[in-house]
């Protein structure tokens, strides 16, 4: 079994990126005009990469399945973006952001990549402010920060609870400028159906126009996949309905190794499931844990009374509440990392303390914050700090100014007022740390094929810290890929236009056509959603917040038989050559059905607990994750050999030169 | 809940559409409007009929992909709400609900309730940006302090999700609220002032070319906007545009 080479440059950690940039090959401005690059996906990573590549002079073709690049799911990111600016003077630095990220990821990420991420983080904020992104500011006119989980400094920049929206619209505006100049050709409502290889290199893609169903061939000198994560394998997740693994999975099947699929983030603060009709879950930003306190009742009698409707949470006295995160993790309290907070919620609910009818919810309570802010404001304004009603009203106004849109969203969905009664929350699938394996240059194991943003695996290890996804997406797209891709493309300046009339393109298109026709002509009985929901149940019950050998083995065989049944009994209405959402969904679910199996296989083989991957067999007496650094200090990169069960494990060993690998503790 | 739905069906942009009636039962008041549509579509698929096409993606009110004109209002009867965040508890058992696409000359129907809003993208491409390249050497983010009030108002304008409810609600199918939100965001920030003149001129020109109507200050757009974008933005854009004319 040959090992994977990360191609991390030699030298001191803090100099690797600078030296690498100085030494890699460049493409001259005149030659960039001769080179085409395809970018699939227009979220933070895809949009920022498309805009920057076009600014540099490359001809970019960008693709998204939505009706506009502005709708990519980065838009829904709420809380903020990290950057080591140290504007608060609280001791932050590039090194500290790097260290927090490696530790938060439970020592399963690459030192060189993470250091580079921390290094470029400050440039991202400068870039976005210059673009007109309206970040939150304080009264002196300077940028404001807040705290996120797993860190002891305030380094998160934000725009209310809509930071992702503002950053994406910034990247979208940069794209628009290039579309206007003709340097980006934008293809809305197009889905990538396959990657085309010519002489072993990525040379184009086959797409389906979702309006009229037509298949199209697009050639380029390099292909960049920025299609996001695969959380929708669980059916219910905080991802958008259309978020899918198809582009990433297609390149996997063409030779790009898929890394750490079992590293999935279950976010602790989401609105609980309300019934079988549910189509998606809604996140309540982690930023709420700055001010909200998480608790369940101490006494099981109170839990019962709440479930039966005889008791309201506001009627339970302080001493009868179990603020379990503050109890278990006094140093970090409510701001422990996501994996830790999620497991702690599950532990309480499994023990019978869940506070809604399904027993799967805990409280997130803002009453202390409202009191604290209210008193502060009363003091500032010279009003009576003992006037309860006044303090309460003033406090609510402050909380509204910080989290107004989140509270409104909660009220719309749950029909309860979170200013008056604590929110109910429960963990849900949110982000996937695993993804396409890439080297230091963000190139996959296919020459000329790159993966950026959530689609790759590179920076978050086994658990991502809050407000780091936006940072990584924009770092990859604005500041890393545009440099590293030149090193590869410098060999392509004499290649000329990539023809799409070659047998490779013809065959790839034909294979897609056959596959689509099969779906349409299959006279089955079950809808796509039927299979997607079934897969989601298997994933959640057996590959979710905690996993064990028996469950994972069952998951593998259940997914296999579900996949078999899918191809036998799927029913897809309509035709291929028309707007047909069911057909688009069928293609995506087919890929989730393969990914799901590889996911379970990866989780089965990693016999340790780390970050978001919790194997019940491997835990400390206190129920914390127990890593095995002797045997598992590596990235699992899976090579496709036709089907998930035949995939081979290729290891990329992780070397820690700068950091001492320790047991993560947030106590 | 049992409901009667009257839905606009149109198989593609060339064909003629018509309203079709469907009965639907066992709808939970906790469902979102789009989850109710999912139930309908699964019934149609089971029967071998063509499901109703509608745009949707994030289902949490931020991507701007969902649309639908429900009982004569963009995004339905609830205020400050997108269709995906509208819940069935806002309707009564036995009610008849009429569902149409967003209608405007600049938003041609693609299929059923799906419309083409790419005109919005083209207006943004004409000038909805600040012309700076990605360099990593832009000046420090804190080098220009911005008054909190201006920053907050720029943010409020920037929260537009580009759904098109303003156009669909306007009797003239005007896009002024949408365009002015972008113009305002940049004109309130020092970074955006540099090319303010070109921006407003080019965006308004493109807006007119796309076939959007004129603004007659009826304010329906503000009422129906799911993000509460204020009419003030239109006033600000008019002022910007006027000063552009005076300059040239």
Image (tube, rainbow, N blue to C red):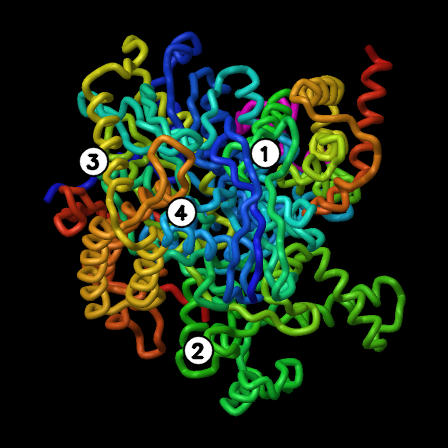
Query: Looking at the image, which is closer to me, A403 or A407?
Result: A407
Q: Give the total number of marks visible in the rendering.
A: 4
Mark 3 and mark 1: Cα distance apart in space: 34 Å
Q: Nearer the viewer, mark 2 or mark 4?
A: 4
Q: Position of residue A642 (x, y in %)?
A: 15, 42
Mark 4 and mark 1: Cα distance apart in space: 42 Å
Q: Which residue is mark 2?
A: A349
Dots 3 and 1 on the same chain: yes
Residue neighbourhood size for the residue with mark 3, other residues' Cα within 10 Å, grouped as few (<14), some (14–19), many (≥20): some
Q: Is residue B62 left or right of residue A607?
A: right
Q: Is residue A379 left or right of residue A149?
A: right
* SS for callout 1: helix
Q: Position of residue B55 (x, y in %)?
A: 52, 42
Extreme residue in the bottom direction: A301
Q: Which residue is mark 4?
A: B49
Magenta part of the chain: B127-144
Dots 3 and 2 on the same chain: yes
Q: Specify the subunit that label 4 lies on.
A: B
Q: Which residue is mark 1?
A: A170
Q: Which numbered circle lies on residue A255?
A: 3
Would residue B223 be seen by someone viewing this image from the given angle? yes
Q: Which quadrant, please, contains the C terminus of chain A?
A: bottom left
Residue neighbourhood size for the residue with mark 2, other residues' Cα within 10 Å, grouped as few (<14), some (14–19), many (≥20): some
At x 40%, y 39%, the residue is A580
At x 40%, y 47%, the residue is B49
- The earlier-in-sequence mark between 3 and 2 is 3
- The earlier-in-sequence mark between 1 and 2 is 1
At x 83%, y 15%, the residue is B245
């Amino acid at each position: 079994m040959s090992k994977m080479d990360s191609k991390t440059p030699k030298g001191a950690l803090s100099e690797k990126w600078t030296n690498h940039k100085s030494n890699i090959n460049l493409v001259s401005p005149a030659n960039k005009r001769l080179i085409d690059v395809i970018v699939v996906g227009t979220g933070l990573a895809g949009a920022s990469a498309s805009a920057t590549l076009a600014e540099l002079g490359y001809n970019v073709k960008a693709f998204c399945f939505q009706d506009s690049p502005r709708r990519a799911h980065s838009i829904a990111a709420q809380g903020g973006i990290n950057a080591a600016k140290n504007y608060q003077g609280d001791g932050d630095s590039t090194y500290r952001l790097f260290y927090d990220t490696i530790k938060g990821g439970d020592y399963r990420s690459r030192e060189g990549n993470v250091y580079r991420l921390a290094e470029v983080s400050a440039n991202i904020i400068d870039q976005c402010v210059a673009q007109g992104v309206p970040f939150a500011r304080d009264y002196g006119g300077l940028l404001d920060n807040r705290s996120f989980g797993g860190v002891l400094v305030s380094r998160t920049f934000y725009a209310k609870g809509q930071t992702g929206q503002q950053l994406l619209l910034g990247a979208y505006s940069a794209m628009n400028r290039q579309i206007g100049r003709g340097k980006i050709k934008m293809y809305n409502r197009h889905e990538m159906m396959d990657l085309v290889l010519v002489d072993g290199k990525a040379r184009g893609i086959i797409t389906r126009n979702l309006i009229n169903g037509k298949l199209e061939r697009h050639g380029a000198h390099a292909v960049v996949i920025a299609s996001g994560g695969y959380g929708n394998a669980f059916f219910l997740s905080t991802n958008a309905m259309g978020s899918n693994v198809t582009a990433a999975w297609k390149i996997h099947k063409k030779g790009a190794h898929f890394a750490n699929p079992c590293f999935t983030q279950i976010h602790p603060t989401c609105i609980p499931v309300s019934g079988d009709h549910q189509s998606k879950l809604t996140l309540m930003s982690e930023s709420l844990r700055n001010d909200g306190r998480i608790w369940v009742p101490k006494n099981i009698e109170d839990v019962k009374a709440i479930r039966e409707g005889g008791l309201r949470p506001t009627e339970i006295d302080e001493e009868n509440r179990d603020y379990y995160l503050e109890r278990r993790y006094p140093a970090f309290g409510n701001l422990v990392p996501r994996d830790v907070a999620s497991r702690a919620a599950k532990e309480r609910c499994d023990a019978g303390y869940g506070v809604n009818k399904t027993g799967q919810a805990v409280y997130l309570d803002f009453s202390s914050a409202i009191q604290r802010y209210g008193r502060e404001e009363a003091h500032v304004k010279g009003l009576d700090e003992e006037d309860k009603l006044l303090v309460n009203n003033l406090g609510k106004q402050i909380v509204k100014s910080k989290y107004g849109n989140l509270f409104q969203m909660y009220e719309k969905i749950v029909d309860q007022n979170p200013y008056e009664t604590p929110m109910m929350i429960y963990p849900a699938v949110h982000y996937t740390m695993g993804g396409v394996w890439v080297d230091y240059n963000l190139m996959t194991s296919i020459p000329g094929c790159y993966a950026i943003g959530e689609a790759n695996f590179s920076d978050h290890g086994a658990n991502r810290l809050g407000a780091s996804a936006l940072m990584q997406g924009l770092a990859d797209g604005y500041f890393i890929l545009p440099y590293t891709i030149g090193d590869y493309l410098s060999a392509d300046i004499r290649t000329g236009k990539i023809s799409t009339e070659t047998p490779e393109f013809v065959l790839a298109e034909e294979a897609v056509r056959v596959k689509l026709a099969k779906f349409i002509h299959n006279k089955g009985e079950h809808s796509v959603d039927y299979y997607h929901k079934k897969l989601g149940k298997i994933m959640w019950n057996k590959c979710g917040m905690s996993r064990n050998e028996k469950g994972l083995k069952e998951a593998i065989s259940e997914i296999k038989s579900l996949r078999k049944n899918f191809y036998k009994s799927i029913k897809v209405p309509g035709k291929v050559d028309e707007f047909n959402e069911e057909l688009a969904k069928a293609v995506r679910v087919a890929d989730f059905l393969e990914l799901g199996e590889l996911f379970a296989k990866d989780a089965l083989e990693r016999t340790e607990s780390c970050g978001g991957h919790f194997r019940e067999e491997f835990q400390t007496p206190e129920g914390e994750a127990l890593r095995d650094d002797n045997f598992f200090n590596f990235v699992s990169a899976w090579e496709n050999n036709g089907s998930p069960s035949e995939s081979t494990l290729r290891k990329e060993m992780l070397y820690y030169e700068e950091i001492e690998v320790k047991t993560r503790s947030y106590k | 809940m049992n409901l009667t739905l009257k839905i606009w069906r149109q198989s593609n942009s060339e064909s003629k559409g018509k309203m079709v009636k469907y009965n639907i039962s066992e709808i939970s008041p906790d469902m979102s409007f789009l989850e109710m549509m999912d139930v309908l579509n699964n019934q149609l698929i089971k029967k071998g009929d063509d499901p109703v096409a509608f745009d949707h993606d994030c289902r949490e009110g931020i991507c701007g992909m969902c649309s639908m004109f429900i009982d004569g209002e963009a995004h339905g009867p609830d205020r400050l709400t997108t269709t995906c965040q509208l819940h069935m508890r806002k309707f009564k058992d036995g009610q008849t609900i009429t569902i149409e696409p967003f209608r405007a000359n600049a938003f041609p129907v693609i299929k059923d309730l799906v419309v083409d809003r790419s005109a919005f993208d083209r207006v943004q491409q004409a000038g909805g940006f600040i012309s700076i390249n990605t360099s990593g050497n832009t000046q420090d983010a804190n080098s220009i302090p911005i008054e909190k009030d201006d920053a907050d108002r720029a943010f409020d304008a920037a929260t537009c999700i580009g759904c098109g409810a303003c156009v669909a609600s306007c009797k003239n199918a005007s896009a002024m609220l949408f365009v002015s939100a972008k113009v305002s965001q940049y004109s309130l920030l020092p970074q955006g002032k540099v090319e303010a003149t070109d921006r407003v001129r080019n965006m308004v020109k493109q807006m007119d070319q796309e076939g959007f109507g004129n603004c007659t200050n009826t304010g329906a757009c503000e009422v129906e906007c799911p993000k509460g974008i204020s009419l003030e933005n239109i006033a600000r854009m008019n002022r910007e545009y006027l000063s552009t004319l005076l300059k040239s």
